[in-house]
Amino acid sequence: MSEPTIYIIILSVSVFILNSNISFALKKNEITHENSLMVVEHLSQYASKKKNYRYFPQNYQSHGYKIIGKISGNDAYLDYSFPLIYNNESNFTIKLNAHNVSSVISQFGCEMSCFESTNMDGFILRTDNISHLKEQMNQDGFYFKSLEKDGFGINYKHVIQISNDLTSQIASFLLNELNRHNKDSYENRIQSALNFVQFIPYGVPHFDSETHSYMGLAIPHESLAISYSDCDSKSTLFAGILHHLIAPENIILVSCLIDEGAHMITGVAGLNYPGQYYNYNNKEFLLIETTVPIPLESQPSNKFKEVNIIPIS
């Protein structure tokens, strides 16, 4: 057999294997997303505000870990292995009830008559009827102050409050795990909570239905059940967990700009690592990226522009 023939055979086999692996990877992602979809739809079945979870998340990226759900009656059991700190891996399991989760989900959402998304990942008001906007938006996790660009948005403090039962259970688990490894410290509490959030797959949620809009946010229950989350969803989850572990006044949410556009991160005071800091209320807050696995000691410098503080305490 001639060398060109052998080369063509090897090339053909390689292309076949590569295409098979790509197809398998895509199929695997579809299957795991379908499993998560079943879980989140099961847990939200009694919600008064309907959501459309069936969009495949934009910019989906896995970091080697995923939350796996199993349905049993009105409950769902979630299982999540993740790096706690250093080389210690932990396994978190929790039972969520459909009635309870649906009740929480019903406390977040805004009438579609108020605002709509734009092609630039932003939102614009659909009406200038101020009385209607005040009545419809100043409830269930949203606020309206004015017709200006930044005069309306998500009330993240509300989202953290309605998720307290879930985030307190996560925080208790992290604290028990740190004590089990004799590693409890201020820094390790923050790092373990950060790892819990960062290793959840990344994906931009779009849950809007015909009647309600959610401004691209997955509340903590949804981030776990559907096993993906984006920057503001992850930052809200991180801040929610963290405020059970450290003083709430040491935590802020931060909206900002990066090269890719609008972004959200979390600021934490009382740390001494390299990175970008922001002075707020006479405290230096380390600005922490929550979307992808970056440890505390490797946080970026001078990346976050036009910083705007959102206090949670």
Image (cartoon, grey):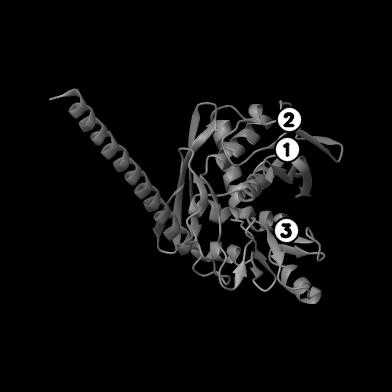
Secondary structure found at label 2: loop
Instruction: Give the CA separation, mark 2 to mark 1.
Output: 7 Å
Name the residue located 62 percent from the left edge and 62 percent from the top edge.
Answer: 214
Location of residue 274 (image quadrant): top right
Mark 1 is surrounded, within 10 Å at the Cα level, by few (under 14), some (14 to 19) or many (20 or more) other residues, namely many
Q: Are marks 2 and 1 in contact (CB under 8 Å)?
A: yes
Name the residue located 44 percent from the left edge and 54 percent from the top edge.
Answer: 36
Extreme left residue here? 1
Q: Are marks 3 and 1 in contact (CB under 8 Å)?
A: no
* Mark drawn on residue 271: 2
In this picture, residue 72 sits left or right of residue 57 = left
Query: Disc 1 residue type?
Result: Val
Secondary structure found at label 1: strand
Location of residue 271 (image quadrant): top right
Name the residue located 77 percent from the left edge and 49 percent from the top edge.
Answer: 310
Instruction: Give the CA separation, mark 3 to mark 2.
Output: 27 Å
In this picture, residue 274 sits left or right of residue 231 = right
Vertical placement of residue 150 versus 48, above or below:
above
* Residue 147 image offset from top left, x and y in percent: 81, 66
Q: Which residue is mark 3?
A: 155
Q: Earlier in the sequence, mark 3 or mark 1?
A: 3
Mark 2 is surrounded, within 10 Å at the Cα level, by few (under 14), some (14 to 19) or many (20 or more) other residues, namely some
Which corner quadrant holds the N terminus? top left
In this picture, residue 213 sits left or right of residue 143 = left
* Residue 89 image offset from top left, x and y in percent: 48, 32
